Image (cartoon, rainbow, N blue to C red):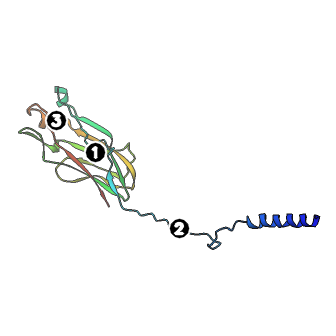
């Protein structure tokens, strides 16, 4: 009987241990299986929605004699936020030849606009006299995500006293358009 118990125990052990061995990667080779992962990239360039210039307003107030005899500057920090997969230029233009208040007008060339340091954008920063023609404000900015640019708007004391002084009171308005162009 001892022999039968030992044989039964061995048979039970062989059954339990012999059938529970897992067969790794049944039906596959021993090197595993492979999946292809694709990264599909497209060129992008965009002035991001978080740009201060999007729907922004820059105000110059002339209320006193000192205002007409002094240069005025308004710097808008992080005015533009641009994402681009290629190097790019930033261009600017006025949407018309004049700042307009009803039938009254002031030429847009009274204003200078300058790209200034302080943001994360690099490249060659230029100063332009505003006009209705595209002009390059930043040349050869490098690729990157959410590159920021601060912009300085200015009217000289000479332009204020010679061009603005004597114009009909009121708010003169003109839109300025910025574009980013891949190189």
73 above or below 129? above
Where is residue 158 shown, x and y percent of the image?
Answer: 17, 37
Say which residue label 2 marks. Answer: 35
Between the residue at mark 1 and the residue at mark 3, the CA separation in whole angstroms equals: 18 Å
Q: Earlier in the sequence, mark 1 or mark 3?
A: 1
- Within 10 Å of disc 2 (Cα), the crowding (few <14, some 14-19, many 20+) is few
Residue sitting at 56 percent across and 69 percent down? 34
Q: Secondary structure at mark 2?
A: loop
Q: Which mark is residue 114?
A: 1
Q: Secondary structure at mark 1?
A: strand
Q: Earlier in the sequence, mark 2 or mark 3?
A: 2
Mark toward the viewer: 1 or 2:
2
Q: Dividing the picture into quarters, in which one does residue 161 lie?
A: top left
- Within 10 Å of disc 3 (Cα), the crowding (few <14, some 14-19, many 20+) is many
Task: Give the residue at the far left of this rendering.
Answer: 103
93 above or below 60? below
> Pointers 1 and 3 in contact (CB under 8 A)?
no
Residue sitting at 22 percent across and 48 percent down? 177
Q: Nearer the viewer, residue 84 or 132?
A: 84
Q: Which mark is residue 160?
A: 3
Q: Which mark is residue 146?
A: none
Between the residue at mark 2 and the residue at mark 3, the CA separation in whole angstroms equals: 68 Å
Q: How many marks?
A: 3
């Amino acid at each position: 009987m001892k022999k039968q118990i030992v044989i039964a125990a061995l048979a039970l052990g062989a059954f339990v241990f012999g059938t529970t061995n897992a067969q790794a990667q049944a039906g596959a080779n021993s090197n595993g299986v492979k999946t292809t992962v694709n990264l599909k990239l497209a060129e992008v360039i965009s002035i991001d929605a978080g740009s201060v210039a999007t729907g922004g307003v820059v105000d110059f107030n002339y209320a006193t004699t000192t205002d007409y005899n002094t240069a005025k500057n308004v710097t808008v920090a992080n005015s533009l936020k641009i994402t681009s997969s290629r190097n790019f230029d930033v261009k600017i233009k006025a949407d018309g030849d004049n700042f307009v208040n009803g039938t009254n007008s002031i030429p847009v060339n009274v204003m200078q606009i300058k790209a200034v340091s302080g943001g994360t954008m690099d490249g060659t920063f230029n100063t332009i006299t505003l006009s209705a023609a595209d002009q390059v404000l930043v040349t050869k900015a490098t690729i990157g995500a959410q590159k920021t640019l601060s912009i300085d708007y200015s009217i000289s004391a000479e332009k204020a006293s010679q061009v603005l002084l004597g114009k009909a009171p009121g708010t003169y308005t003109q839109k300025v358009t910025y574009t980013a162009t891949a190189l």
